[in-house]
Amino acid sequence: MLHGGLSFVSVYLLRAPAKLNLYLRVFDKTEDGYHEIESLTQTIDLSDYLEVEFTKGVGIKVNVTSGSFNVNPEANTLIRTYEVLEEEYGGIDFGLVVKLHKRIPIGGGLGGGSSDAAALLRFLRGVLGISMDETLRVAFKVGSDVPALLFGGTVLVRGRGEIVEQLEPLPRYGVFLNCPEFPVDTRQAYLWLDETRIEFPSHTAMDCYEALNRGDFGLVWNDFRSVISRKVPPVEKALKEFEKQHGKAFLTGSGSCVFSLSVSHSDHSFLPRFDIT
């Protein structure tokens, strides 16, 4: 047996939801070469699922069921999560076998890999008895999107992703998604943005949040939209198609997935936050 009555013979099913960036502002590089951001993130019901088993050895093995998605398990954030926990706490006295059922498109700006890591970390936090502050620190070492996805729901994100604030849930809007089969490399997207940025928002993430609470989608914003639509024709096409179908279309992350919001029927919907304290 493990901490808290967890068993070596049980399989634990974890949900890892995708996220949307309802607002994403990217500031200029700091002196150390990094960008700070201000973002409003929201989890939705499109999800990966993790089946987790404990083993009596050490280390982690990840098996991926990914449909048509090309996933490299060696680079998976689940492995990184286990490794960071080992580094921080001087070794872990159990091993893990994780079967990852991949449903969130890769390279689409939906945070699938980060959400997988957050789901595993949320679970192991209880096993290892880690404080919330320590969990957030580990999360940020794994990836900049991971802290916000620990909580799920509606989250205000600042800094490099390490400053997160849970907000009261937004209305449960519907979501239409279109993910062109053309993943966008995040590093390349930042380079393009640095070279060709031409638009700046006049409103903040909290302005966007307040507007969404009123049912107003007009302040949804993403700094990457202009440059990605210019540089990646399939994204520009997807945005135009959704504008014709739904009136407004938005980019999440650095793409390539685009989305529209609805107050009525849709393919997906907003998810509430996780119960994590």
Image: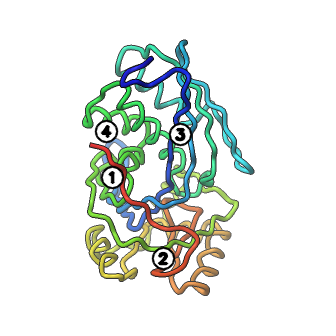
Q: CA distance from mark 3 to mark 4?
A: 22 Å
Left or right, residue 45 beside residue 90? right
Element marked by disc 1:
strand
Q: Nearer the viewer, mark 1 or mark 2?
A: 2
Q: CA separation, marks 3 and 2?
A: 29 Å
Residue 136: mark: 4
Question: Mark 1 or 3 closer to N-term?
Answer: 3
Q: Position of residue 230 (x, y in %)?
A: 59, 71
Name the residue tied to disc 1: 36
As shown in the figure, which amino acid type bears the numbered disc 4? Answer: Leu
Q: Quadrant of the C terminus?
A: top left
Disc 1 vs disc 3: which is toward the camera?
3
Compute the Cα span from label 1 to label 2: 27 Å
Q: How far is disc 1 from disc 3 in space, using C-alphas?
A: 34 Å
Residue located beneath label 2 in the image: 261
Residues marked 1 and 2 touching at CB (< 8 Å): no
Which label's residue is closer to the chain start, 2 or 4? Answer: 4
According to the image, label 3 marks what residue?
13
